[in-house]
Amino acid sequence: MSVVLKFGGTSVATADALERVVRIVRAAAGERVVVVSATAGTTNSLIETVRAAAKGDVVGAEEIMTRLASSHDDLLRKSARKDVEETSSVLDELAQRSKALVRSVAILHECSARTQDAIVSYGELASSEIVAATLRSHGIDAVAVPATRMVVTDDAFGNAAPAFEETYARAKAELEPLLRAGKVPVVTGFIGATREGVITTLGRGASDYSAAILAAALRADECLIYTDVSGVMSADPRMVQGARPLPRLSYAEAAELSYFGAKVLHPRAVLPAIEVGIPVRILNTFAPDEAGTTITRQADTDGSIVKATTSLGGLGLLTVQGAGMSGIPGFAAKVFDTTAEQSISVLMISQASSENSICIVVPADTADRLKHALEKMLAKELAHHDVERVSMERPIAVVAAVGEGMRGTPGVAARVFGALGRAGVNVIAIAQGSSELNISFCVTEAEQARAVRAVHDEFHSAPETSASPTRAAVAR
Ligand code: ADP
Ligand code: ASP
Ligand code: MG
């Protein structure tokens, strides 16, 4: 039996939380690999440091670094009783290295993604040392292991992609001897390194991904993601009071939910697990006896239609519109070539069947750049009025209703949009994948929370039958 246990930011941020981590690790049976995030707020603060330094604010940047270093040292001293001085000096070395990098950013007034990755890696490197020392203090033979020795990635700094085969081989070579020796490796989530050994990061929130990668490498029996809520819930609990934990999800449902904003799980985290068929469980560090959510290959037919409603704000919507677009072969391809050239990831696409408009949803901070690039690419069509305009709206949000039970159930869209209509929410664009696993739509960011609540309440406050009289009336 082997398990990978991943603890998120809040689960490692205080002495009380670390006590709970100790109890959970101690209670886990068999071989255990622990994966940790940086303590809550640390990655954000490190990015803030980088920004301050890049503006030349060396004093402000150093202040944040000093504050972070002293809070890490405090946490160590409150939580660990063994190896405290040795670990404290390791923490100090890590902080000094990041501080030196921050100073060089302040001198250059410029920070590359590569340098930023090296600076933010401090968060996970420091927390893995603190967690390992705390576990050792409680009689668990733990050892901090930087993932840079195992997770081999490309050089897309800030959002690097792992080379799976190489990573799996290295992870086995690094971790199996430790496990055989009865040790508990405490591995840094979020970070990796290129083949040349340059530190990279796998994207915000990617410690979940790191855990799934290591679970797949070791063919672990389970990948347990410990966080601060009792599983994936029917909606973001910060937005919807009546949100409930979902006992079971399929990999496909989990992937859709996290892609559309369920922050509780990183969107890529399920991929390595799917390939090997490892169940992923989302559990609560602060209520470890609660059942949480189990994510497996099987589509779960629990009778529900929409399992969860999620949303993602901070987006921009670009609409390319014009009567002359219809029927031009390759028109959509030209539009998407432009997004690719600009390295902008598209979150949602919708095209009216008349082909008079194409809507593209992208991160809000890339929308201006994409609008200019599209206008440049379409200069001829705009001049001839084949394309009337490229318009942009922001900030907008995408809301998604997700559930395997939607497949083949008539009237779901009518219920979704009926509920939005009754709540007075204006829908800007709609998309539904042919998998029928989700219906997603755009609203203004101001209406995001209202839209989520309306859809959530439609499917979660009443017994679910798609053919109840009021629903049928809406469907007509
Ligand atoms: P960790 O640091 O443990 O990885 P995160 O902050 O990344 O934790 O993710 C957990 C948070 O995700 C929860 O505290 C909750 O506010 C948020 N969240 C958003 N959508 C959902 C959802 N559908 N179910 C559960 N939590 C959600
Ligand atoms: N510390 C990283 C972040 O805040 C990774 C993670 O927490 O999963 O994005
Ligand atoms: Mg997270």
Image (cartoon, rainbow, N blue to C red):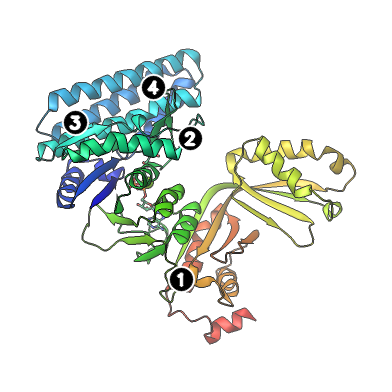
The span from disc 4 to disc 3 (Cα, nearest Å) is 21 Å
Considering only order in the chain, which callout, 1 or 3, is on the residue closer to the N terminus? 3
* Left or right: 243 in relation to 283: right
Does the Cβ of the disc 1 residue fall within 8 Å of ligand 1?
no
Outermost residue, bottom direction?
469
- The residue tagged with tag 2: helix, strand or loop? loop
Q: Find disc 1 in the rendering and name its residue.
A: 457
Outermost residue, top direction?
107
- Whether the residues at callouts 1 and 2 have beta carbons within 8 Å, the answer is no
Considering only order in the chain, which callout, 4 or 1, is on the residue closer to the N terminus? 4
Q: Position of residue 268 (x, y in %)?
A: 46, 47
Q: Find disc 2 in the rendering and name its residue.
A: 160
The span from disc 1 to disc 4 (Cα, nearest Å) is 45 Å
- Nearest the viewer among 35 and 89 is 35
* Left or right: 110 in relation to 321: left
The span from disc 2 to disc 4 (Cα, nearest Å) is 29 Å
Residue 234 seen from this side = no
Q: Find disc 3 in the rendering and name its residue.
A: 74
Residue at (40, 25) in percent of width and height: 118
- The residue tagged with tag 4: helix, strand or loop? helix
Q: Is residue 186 above or below residue 241?
A: above
Q: Quadrant of residue 196?
A: top left
| Amino acid tagged 3 | Asp
- Whether the residues at callouts 3 and 1 have beta carbons within 8 Å, the answer is no
- Nearest the viewer among 371 and 251 is 251
Q: Is residue 70 above or below residue 260?
A: above
| Amino acid tagged 1 | Asp
Few, some or many C-alpha atoms within 10 Å of disc 1 (few <14, some 14-19, many ≥20)? some
Q: Find disc 4 in the rendering and name its residue.
A: 60
